Image (spheres, coloured by chain):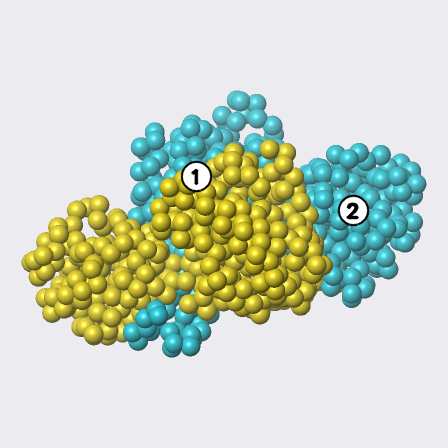
Chain colours: A cyan, B yellow
Amino acid sequence: MREEIRQMGLDARTAAHEMAKIGSAQKRQALEAVAVALGEARAAIDAANRKDVAEALDKGLAAAKVDRLRLTDKVLTEMTDGLREIALLPDPVGEITRLWTRPNGLRVGRMRIPLGVVGIVYESRPNVTIDAAALCIKAGNAVVLRGGSEAFHSNQCLAKILQESLNTSGLPAQAVQLVGTTDRQAVLELLQLEEYVDVMIPRGGEDLIRFVTANARMPVLKHYKGVCHVYVDAGADFEMAEKICLNAKVQRPGVCNAMETLLVHQDVAAGFLPSMAAAFRREGVELRGCDRTRMIVPECVAATEEDWYAEYLDLILAVKVVDSMEEAISHLTTYGSQHTEAIVTRNFDRAHRFLQEVQSSLVLVNASTRFNDGFQLGLGAEIGISTSRLHAFGPMGVEELTTTKFIAMGDGQLRE
Amino acid sequence: MREEIRQMGLDARTAAHEMAKIGSAQKRQALEAVAVALGEARAAIDAANRKDVAEALDKGLAAAKVDRLRLTDKVLTEMTDGLREIALLPDPVGEITRLWTRPNGLRVGRMRIPLGVVGIVYESRPNVTIDAAALCIKAGNAVVLRGGSEAFHSNQCLAKILQESLNTSGLPAQAVQLVGTTDRQAVLELLQLEEYVDVMIPRGGEDLIRFVTANARMPVLKHYKGVCHVYVDAGADFEMAEKICLNAKVQRPGVCNAMETLLVHQDVAAGFLPSMAAAFRREGVELRGCDRTRMIVPECVAATEEDWYAEYLDLILAVKVVDSMEEAISHLTTYGSQHTEAIVTRNFDRAHRFLQEVQSSLVLVNASTRFNDGFQLGLGAEIGISTSRLHAFGPMGVEELTTTKFIAMGDGQLRE
């Protein structure tokens, strides 16, 4: 197995060298070919997917998890639409981002190039196989994929379609490779290949991400969790604040950019919280509050220290009344995960300071935390969200799958 | 010890939060205060440095290594000049690098912020203590330093001066901390602190860098070695090519951006190599060549497969005659280290293609490989060179010690 995984790495490195030279038109055409091929292979995809679903049901997997496995018509349409959108994004490769001239006449610049080989270790949803591969191809990379064992047959089928389409379009088929075993040892081998894999992106539960981070020799782009905050400032527009808080909590509670803790300035707590709590009650949200919150909202459960750290991913919300914006920032810095924080305010100076001082991957004024998403922020698509600060901080789109090299053009310059 | 190192990490994180809020003028003033303090503490620095030198001599350290330890007048002046130059660089923190508006009216941008806590593990030269700390402070970071055991007393003295100057200037003294033991276990503990240290930068020999990479839980910015190439193209200006090759090889052979392999197009080999070889002979450079090189330069030793991989860091050069630029690129991709490659050519199309297709951290046309240096390329200073492609590829200056977060300003936008 070690040899097999090493060979995949070597093949990926070779494919990456070829991919770096492929022009924009050819990459676009290849992605569109994948979209067409997915439509044509509908029967094969269904058959593979049915195997995974049947095995999942046999194993007694929770219904929600089985649902995430299913490649329904809706999911298939989203996959092909996504492919076509990625195909049409501007190609970042080759862009000269800056160019300047040194006193000795040397012209120095930075040119955007592919990262090289991207490794992705993910769980469950088989559509990630297509989305992630498409973004990697667009940015001129090769990718090594390791999907979850539950989606094994679906992933195999999708990877085969990808490879055939690349081949037909004149791109190296080895630019997309799927680890063909569900043995966990294969992941460990993959994580050792620092000479072949330039970056590893784990997507899934916190356990998977911690396993990858602890064992990877190459850099890892990841976030462990999203403990996101909304701070309702003194003088905030209550109606706007209530809508933003509801959207941030209940629009899709199970995702990383949903609000987990609400912070309210003491001056507006008594005015804002009763109506807000009633709105949450109507949506079935359980509130866990500090003492001051519970004086205003008596039915609220007492929050413990653990609640301030919690990523519920559920219809539960921690609520704390704070003395000032400084206390709000201090709280979210201490208990948060540097993922997403929003302020609702009318005050220019505090909006400005919140944007400056909060060091999370997305900081918002008067908008929902649910916007921390590559598509929503205008990156076209995303391969994940990073709360590691190196290389990428926030949603990662096509550009985050590239790097820049230095270039220099001279006429015989020597170092003195 | 584990507790002590963890406490340093926690203190660094706390200091980093404070540092992120410090304004440009105050950081500049603090760096200038360090320069003044270094001059005033000359006697204390001398005393500490003499202890290190005496211990090194007792241990029988090689003369070259002892020399690198010495904080001479020249080194001290370079340190204070460097501090003043870094103080005057533009402050990257707070810059909004891009700002765009989404269809829903949300204004989205990217704002430059400090990386947070930088860890630096280095060997020998004590001036790194000042240079590295100054760059980290300029970019608004906190830094944890672990110097080599040979420079223990010098580093302690310099770190104390840094901390006192920070304190006097109203910056958190814990923004610069030096691990106060030479026990290697302390490095291992430091490398586990992923929640406190955002990035680790090892500087020193390949063994140290491999040790740090293998054990670090946080991202590592590094290069293992520099196997740099100059390719002399068909039709090149021989005089320019000879000057560039000499400069790249002999101006300072012991550094990572010196040329290690010369590639010559077959059409010009017979015309170019005899005079070039004579020039190298005059400078005492030993040549190791391929068969075709040896037919033109008979005194040249036969190169083995190992020579193409070698980073000599010495007056030795591997020489190979190639059929084409494609073979040159294929050779440097296979045997090189993605550090620095130069082409000497008069041909526009090949210059253009070499710049596009060579995927090294610096690619030059008609200039010496020795320019791969942050100061030379115009970054003002450098904290090291990265050949990992993540985050930074090439010399790392102040900007590479920052990251960007996303910001978003709305008027009540919700996710649909």
Of circles 1 and 2, which is in front? 1
Which labelled disc corresponds to residue B134? none
Q: Position of residue B52 (x, y in %)?
A: 48, 46
Residue at 31 percent across and 67 percent down: it is: B368
Q: Nearer the viewer, residue B281 or B326?
A: B281
Alpha carbon separation for disc pair 1 and 2: 44 Å
Q: Is residue A172 left or right of residue A36?
A: left
Q: Amino acid at mark 2?
A: Leu
Q: Is residue A100 left or right of residue B398?
A: left
Task: Give the residue number, with chain letter if any, for mark 1.
Answer: B211
Q: Position of residue A219 (x, y in %)?
A: 47, 45
Instruction: Place residue B237 in its image quadrant.
Output: bottom left
Quadrant where the N terminus of chain B sits is top right
- Residue B125 is at least partly visible in this image: yes
Task: Give the residue number, with chain letter if any, for mark 2.
Answer: A262
Relative height, residue B78 to residue B180 (above, below): below
Chain assignment, label 1:
B
Q: Amino acid at mark 1?
A: Phe
Q: Secondary structure at mark 1?
A: helix
